[in-house]
């Protein structure tokens, strides 16, 4: 998110009933009161069902923001990154987080886990049963990066939009 805005952002934390999941939402307002950027973030458990929950979270967030352009690409990439966090990233007993940021030029999706390693899009052989997910994500997204954190890493993908 950009810094140096003239008005402080408003932040809302939501706690879902019957869940340890916390969702944060922030919307920064410009001088005219129009949103210039906003984000939603949610934690998910290290469980296979989380990929589906991430797809739903991304779809609901985009719908709430009125973003329909490239929605299927964003949902697919987010669920693939979530599946990687579950299978390879988040250690047992830990969660991972998904953050969506809407800016004037597009949408960013970040998946952060506390596990070791640095994922790299692979080039599996034709007979390989896996290893194509990150290559697909990198091909669908306009931006793809992996950032090492003090603990774990963040995989970040960006999607430019004609109209946000």
Image (cartoon, rainbow, N blue to C red):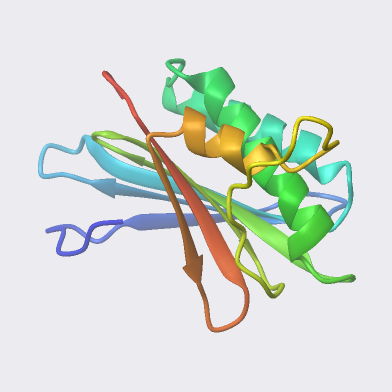
The residue sitting at 45% across, 34% down in the picture is 141
Q: Quadrant of residue 43?
A: bottom right
Residue 111, given in percent of the width and then of the height, sits at 59, 54
Q: Quadrant of residue 80?
A: top right
Instruction: Work out whether residue 79 can be spotted.
Output: yes
So how many labels did they put on this image?
Answer: 0
**Which quadrant is home to the N terminus?**
bottom left
The residue sitting at 43% across, 27% down in the picture is 65
Report the front residue among 46 and 25: 46
Left or right for 91, reference 148: right
Q: Specify the farthest residue to the bottom.
A: 150
Instruction: Work out whether residue 45 can be spotted.
Output: no
Report the front residue among 62 and 90: 90
**Which quadrant is home to the C terminus?**
top left
Using the image, determine if residue 85 lies above or below residue 81.
Answer: below
Left or right for 6, reference 159: left
């Amino acid at each position: 998110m950009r810094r140096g805005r003239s008005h402080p952002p408003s932040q809302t934390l939501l706690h879902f009933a019957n869940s340890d999941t916390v969702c944060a939402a922030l919307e920064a307002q410009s001088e005219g009161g129009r949103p210039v950027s906003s984000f939603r973030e949610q934690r998910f458990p290290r469980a296979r069902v989380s990929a589906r929950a991430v797809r739903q979270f991304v779809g609901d967030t985009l719908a709430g923001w009125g973003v329909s352009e490239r929605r299927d690409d964003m949902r697919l990439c987010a669920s693939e990154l979530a599946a990687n966090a579950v299978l390879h990233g988040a250690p047992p007993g830990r969660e991972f987080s998904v953050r969506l940021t809407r800016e004037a030029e597009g949408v960013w999706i970040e998946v952060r886990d506390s596990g070791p390693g640095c994922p790299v899009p692979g080039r599996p052989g034709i007979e390989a049963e896996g290893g194509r997910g990150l290559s697909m994500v990198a091909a669908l997204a306009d931006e793809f990066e992996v950032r090492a954190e003090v603990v774990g890493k963040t995989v970040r993908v960006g999607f430019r939009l004609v109209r946000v």
